[in-house]
Image (tube, rainbow, N blue to C red):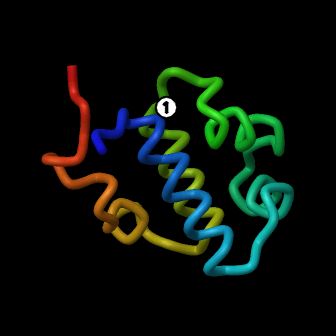
């Protein structure tokens, strides 16, 4: 399956929420984003996700940006880049 950047970010968020046993609300608090903003990313309501948002999400998980992006979703062969 090919992922858009937004889909890849959403999938990674879901994966990490489960692994870290966090809620979307808690991620919002930790990242400085609103709970609805996180939900829009996960549910693909946002068609684009900017770099600042991804960095804030990574920080909310207590990770570096490189750690957040270290997932198969972000491998170039798995991304639908237009």
Residue 75, percent from left and from top = 20, 54
Q: What secondary structure is marked by label 1?
A: loop
Residue beneath the point at 74% across and 40% down:
39
- In the rendered picture of this protein, how many numbered marks are placed on residues? 1
On the image, numbered disc 1 is attached to which residue? 49
Asked if 73 appears above or below 22 in the picture, the reply is: above
Q: Is residue 18 above or below residue 81?
A: below
Seen as rendered, the residue at the extreme left is: 77
Query: Which residue does the image show at 33% across and 65% down from the upper left?
Result: 71
From the top left corner, tell me how far across and down residue 82 is, in percent: 21, 19
Residue at the image position 25 percent from the left and 40 percent from the top:
79
Towards the viewer: 70 or 14: 14
Q: Residue at x 74, y 50 (%)?
A: 32
Could you tell whether 71 is left or right of 30 in the image?
Answer: left
Front residue of 45 and 52: 45
Asked if 62 appears above or below 65 in the picture, the reply is below
Quadrant showing the N terminus: top left
In front here: 57 or 41? Answer: 41
In percent of width and height, residue 54 lies at 49, 47
Looking at the image, residue 77 sits to the left or right of residue 56; the answer is left
Identity of the residue furthest to the front in this view: 1
Q: Is residue 73 left or right of residue 11?
A: left
Q: Residue 3 sits in which quadrant?
A: top left
Residue that lies at the very extreme toward the bottom in this rendered image: 20
């Amino acid at each position: 399956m090919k992922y858009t950047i937004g889909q890849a970010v959403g999938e990674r968020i879901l994966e990490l929420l489960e692994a870290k046993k966090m809620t979307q609300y808690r991620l919002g608090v930790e990242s400085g984003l609103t709970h609805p903003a996180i939900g829009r990313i996960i549910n693909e309501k946002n068609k684009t996700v900017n770099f600042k948002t991804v960095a804030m999400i990574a920080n909310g998980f207590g990770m570096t940006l490189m750690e957040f992006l270290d997932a198969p979703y972000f491998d170039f062969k798995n991304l639908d880049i237009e």
